[in-house]
Amino acid sequence: MLKMNGTWWRRGLLAVLLVALAVGIKMYFFPAAVANNYITAAVTKGDIETTVLATGTVKAFKQVAVGAQVSGQVKTLKVQLGQEVKKGDVIAEIDARTQKNTLLTEEAQLTNYNAALTAKQASLAKAQLDFTRQATMLKEGASSKENYDAAQATLKVAKADVVQAQAQIKQAKLSADSARLTLSYTQVVAPIDGVVVTIAVEEGQTVNAVQSTPTIVTLAQLDKVTVRAEISEGDVTKVKAGMPAYFTILGDSVTRYETTLASVDPGPVSQSDNTSTASSASTAIYYYGQLHVPNPERTLRADMTTNVSIILDQAKQVLMVPSTALGEKNDKGQYRVQVLDKDKKTSERWITVGLNNNINAQVIDGLTEGEQVVVSQVTTAASSASKKTMGGGPPMGM
């Protein structure tokens, strides 16, 4: 009985080994069938646009550095940082004692010249009478030629004195007006409506306007801002003033600020900024594109970084497929795509494409809405094949 059990056991073990060997040979020499899994996308309707991308910086629509035109001590500052001012509002006052004294001196000099003119006009009147009398007496033979000539010379001198006095008065008036204007400069006023964005001095500080105009404050108009977009030389020939554009800011990539391209600077950025850069083959060239946008809530602030898109072309509510679905291009300008049907079978189709921004492509002809196009293909095995690196039999010792 024990001998029969041993025989059956050996026969069973041999059968298992034969089956395992047969399975291994099949999997090694006849691997499992390969199946294709497709990643697809539906043909949809939507908006598509081709754009030129640029990085920009927010600038005030208008910015003015308000300076002192006279030297002296800043007595009072009448504004604070962020304060809105109107054109003509007093921003600061500079000690005006020197300018007032100068004006009083010039006015006194003018008064003196006016008095001198009055005296010289009286002398002229007397000289005119003397000359007239001498001329009459000379005709009647009652006076000599010498007296007549003397009276005539005196008249000429009196006339010249009056002309001189009148010139001195004109000069004194100009000096007084200049002194009065200089006195007015001690009150620094706002030249435009705007917001105080910087204050460069403090009360009690002395400013010197002899060699340059020291800045007191900087005013900026922020209810409207300008975005200066740096457009690369490879794209600058594609854009022109009037093209629609939009931008977002780093702090809010969702909100789009719609506007138009107002202008493109004729010279590169280095010329617009009055800077010089060493030229080299690796130096990129950019040109400023100017965009203006209202800023009533003052959301946009100076020197913010923006991502600008200038729209070259656009189409709305058109058929689109991902650009990755496009295959080769034929001589007719059509692209090959693979279409997956309901039975999970693919077929090739040639389509006509319009706009293509390398993300989506506009389908003009060849596809209908809802069809599935293949954008990627993944190859998998239907069952796990035996790797050739694996041994064909059980480990030694079994």
Image (cartoon, rainbow, N blue to C red):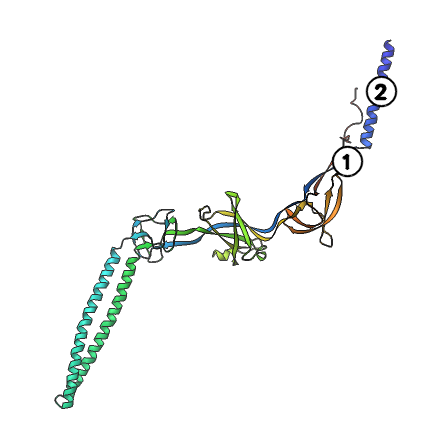
Of the pair 70 and 352, the residue shown nearer to us: 352
Question: For the view shown, which residue lies furthest in the top direction?
Answer: 1
| Residue annotated with mark 1 | 34
**In the displayed structure, does residue 374 sit left or right of residue 233?**
right
Q: Mark 2 belongs to which amino acid?
A: Leu
Which structural element holds mark 1?
A: strand
User: Which numbered mark, 1 or 2, is in the foreground of this view?
Assistant: 1
| Residue annotated with mark 2 | 14
Residue 226 numbered tag = none
The residue at 16%/90% (across/down) is 139
- Residue 322 visible from this viewpoint: no
Q: Residues within 10 Å of mark 2 (few under 14, many from 20)?
A: few
Which structural element holds mark 2?
A: helix
Q: Mark 1 belongs to which amino acid?
A: Val
Is residue 137 shown above or below 374? below
**In the displayed structure, does residue 310 sit left or right of residue 111?**
right
* x and y percentages locating residue 2 in the rendered image: 85, 9
The residue at 22%/66% (across/down) is 110
**In the displayed structure, does residue 1 sit left or right of residue 286?**
right
- Label 1 to label 2, Cα distance in Å? 33 Å
- Residue 131 visible from this viewpoint: yes
* x and y percentages locating residue 5 in the rendered image: 85, 12
Q: Quadrant of the N terminus?
A: top right
Locate residue 386: give its quadrant.
top right
